[in-house]
Amino acid sequence: MGIPINAGLLDAMVLSIVERDDTYGYEITQYLRKAVDVSESTLYPVLRRLQKNEMLETYDKEYMGRNRRYYRVTMKGVETLQDYRAQWLSHKRKVDSILMNEEAAE
């Protein structure tokens, strides 16, 4: 059983991956698959949305004789990612308080 993730969490995960190092779509998909079940056909609309919202920008780079589209995080993307991380920590504490039978830290 997998727990489905929403678009906001997927956006945050993609921004976090790209923040580490500029990368391309297939590599992002492979990294995401370590944590969630996601296909490239799911990922590319996310990348387009993040680009449209000015959180990612692209550039082409030659690799083994062909061009690859690379993604990098913009300043707006970094700021959004910081906000996502703060929201995630708050949400995680609340969920953990229920799932792990812990007291919620308010």
Image: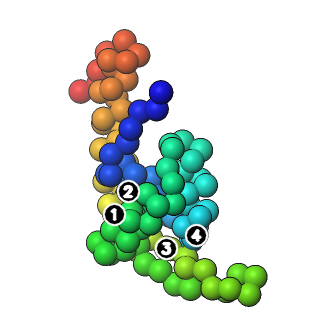
Q: Position of residue 53 (x, y in %)?
A: 29, 72
The answer for how far apart the CA atoms under marks 2 and 1 are is 13 Å
N-term mark: 1 or 4: 4
Residue type at mark 1: give it. Glu
Q: Position of residue 92 (x, y in %)?
A: 36, 32
The answer for how far apart the CA atoms under marks 2 and 3 are is 14 Å
Q: Which residue sits at x=41%, y=16%? A: 100
Q: Are marks 1 and 3 in contact (CB under 8 Å)?
A: no
Residue type at mark 2: give it. Asp
For label 2, the crowd category at 10 Å Cα-Cα, with few meaning under 14, some 14 to 19 and many 20 or more, is: many
Residue topped by disc 4: 23
The answer for how far apart the CA atoms under marks 1 and 3 are is 14 Å
Q: Residue furthest top?
A: 101
N-term mark: 2 or 1: 2
Residue topped by disc 2: 11
Q: Which mark is residue 79?
A: 1
Q: Residue furthest front?
A: 41
Q: Which mark is residue 41?
A: none
Secondary structure beneath dot 1 equals: helix
N-term mark: 2 or 4: 2
Q: Position of residue 2 (x, y in %)?
A: 46, 32
N-term mark: 2 or 3: 2
